[in-house]
Image (cartoon, helix red, strand yellow):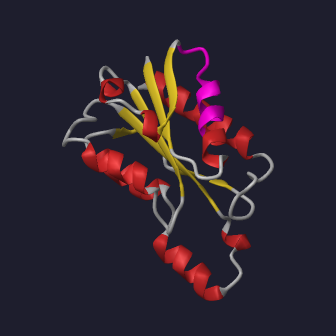
């Protein structure tokens, strides 16, 4: 199985989640966990599973992730299983009511990433997931790395059944 995990990270939290997910797939010989700036088009050739992650910035993925997804041609992900994740604030940490309302309306990065992956022909293997950071720069909430590993195990299990 050929697996590619692409991530962007501003303060290192999303990178930690991507690495935890990648390490869970450690028994797979053909896996790359790579920063968005280092992705090459040939990495998508023969791919079985693509996981994309981004911090939530202004209710959306980073510009680098958006550019990457927009550059993919139609049906370029046909036959490829996909999943997406983000890092985000917990709504419990958003104090002003107006900002909470905006977060509820605007959402988080994983959902638009998933929509774009499906639009490019990907086959959703696992629902998008968000991992919580404490504060703007982090750190990750305690237990989030373990939750990322569990999410990856769900993906492995679903992929083996497909």
Residue 104, compared with residue 132, is above or below; it is below
Q: Is residue 125 visible?
A: no
Residue 108, compared with residue 46, is above or below; it is below
Q: Nearer the viewer, residue 45 or 114?
A: 45
Compared across the picture, whether 134 is left or right of 44 comes to right
Instruction: Tell me which residue sits at (51%, 50%) in the image.
Output: 54
| Quadrant of image for the C terminus | top left
Q: Quadrant of residue 78?
A: top left
| Quadrant of image for the N terminus | top left
Magenta-colored span: 18-28
* x then y, percent, for residue 122: 31, 39
Residue 73, compared with residue 67, is above or below; it is above
Compared across the picture, whether 99 is left or right of 79 comes to right
Q: Nearer the viewer, residue 104 or 141?
A: 141
Compared across the picture, whether 44 is left or right of 159 comes to left
Q: Main secondary structure of the magenta part?
A: helix
Which residue occupies the extreme front position in the image?
A: 37
Instruction: Tell me which residue sits at (45%, 24%) in the image.
Output: 3
In the rendered image, residue 36 lying in the magenta stretch gets the answer no
Q: Quadrant of residue 151?
A: top right
Q: Nearer the viewer, residue 104 or 29?
A: 29
Instruction: Tell me which residue sits at (61%, 30%) in the image.
Output: 153
Q: Is residue 27 visible?
A: yes
């Amino acid at each position: 199985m050929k697996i590619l995990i692409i991530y962007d990270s501003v303060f290192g939290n999303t990178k930690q989640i991507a690495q935890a997910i990648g390490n869970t797939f450690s028994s797979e010989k053909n896996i790359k966990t790579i920063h968005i700036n280092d992705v090459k088009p040939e990495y998508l050739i023969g791919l079985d599973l693509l996981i994309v992650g981004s911090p939530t910035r202004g209710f959306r993925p980073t510009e680098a992730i958006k550019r990457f997804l927009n550059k993919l041609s139609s049906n370029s992900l046909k036959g490829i299983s996909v999943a997406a994740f983000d890092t985000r604030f917990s709504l419990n940490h958003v104090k002003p009511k107006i900002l909470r309302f905006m977060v509820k309306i605007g959402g988080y990065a994983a959902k638009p990433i998933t929509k774009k992956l499906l639009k490019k022909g990907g086959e959703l293997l696992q629902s998008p997931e968000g991992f919580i950071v404490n504060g703007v720069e982090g750190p990750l909430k305690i237990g989030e790395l373990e939750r990322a590993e569990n999410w990856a195990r769900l993906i492995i299990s679903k992929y083996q059944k497909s």
